[in-house]
């Protein structure tokens, strides 16, 4: 049982790291959108290719509610924070309970 608990801990930590990395990519993409970036720049193309699939459904549902201000990055960051607080923390706590339960 401790192997499964260690596996869950590893998955939770990897998921936490990936979500943190994606959150920073979203932040950088939002900051770059404030200037007029060259659309053919490889960094700009990468950021748009990685973030647009997440922004598009949010924009479709919410739209541009604040006029010209795009709030989809804020919604994505809040969703990432929720997933990190709920899912990742639940996986970690479940794994520790599995580890603790085998000594009883």
Image: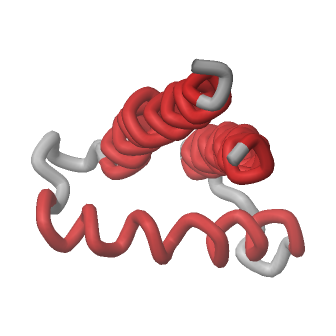
Q: Residue 16 appears in which quarter of the rendering? A: top right
Horizontal side of 63 relative to 7 (left or right) equals left
Front-most of residues 90 and 66: 90
Front-most of residues 79 and 39: 79
Horizontal side of 35 relative to 60 (left or right) equals right
Q: Residue 51 appears in which quarter of the rendering? A: bottom right
Q: At x 53% / y 26%, what residue is drawn? A: 97
Q: At x 85% / y 65%, what residue is drawn? A: 43
Q: Quadrant of the C terminus?
A: top right
Answer yes or no: is residue 28 visible. no
On screen, 25 above or below 48? Answer: above
Residue 73, position as x, y percentages in the image: 42, 46
Answer yes or no: is residue 23 visible. yes
Q: At x 44% / y 33%, what residue is drawn? A: 90
Q: Residue furthest front?
A: 104
Residue 33, position as x, y percentages in the image: 57, 51
Front-most of residues 37 and 50: 50
Count up the numbered dots: 0
On screen, 70 above or below 82? Answer: below
Horizontal side of 3 relative to 53 (left or right) equals right
Front-most of residues 94 and 43: 94
Residue 30, position as x, y percentages in the image: 55, 45
Horizontal side of 86 relative to 91 (left or right) equals left
Q: At x 76% / y 65%, what residue is drawn? A: 44
Residue 48, position as x, y percentages in the image: 63, 70
């Amino acid at each position: 049982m401790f192997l499964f608990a260690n596996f869950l801990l590893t998955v939770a930590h990897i998921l936490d790291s990936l979500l943190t990395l994606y959150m920073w990519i979203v932040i950088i993409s939002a900051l770059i959108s404030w200037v007029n970036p060259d659309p053919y720049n490889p960094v700009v193309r990468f950021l748009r290719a990685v973030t647009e699939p997440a922004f598009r459904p949010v924009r479709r549902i919410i739209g541009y509610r604040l006029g010209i201000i795009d709030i989809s990055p804020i919604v994505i960051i809040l969703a990432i924070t929720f997933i990190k607080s709920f899912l990742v923390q639940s996986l970690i706590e479940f794994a520790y309970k599995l580890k603790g339960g085998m000594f009883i």
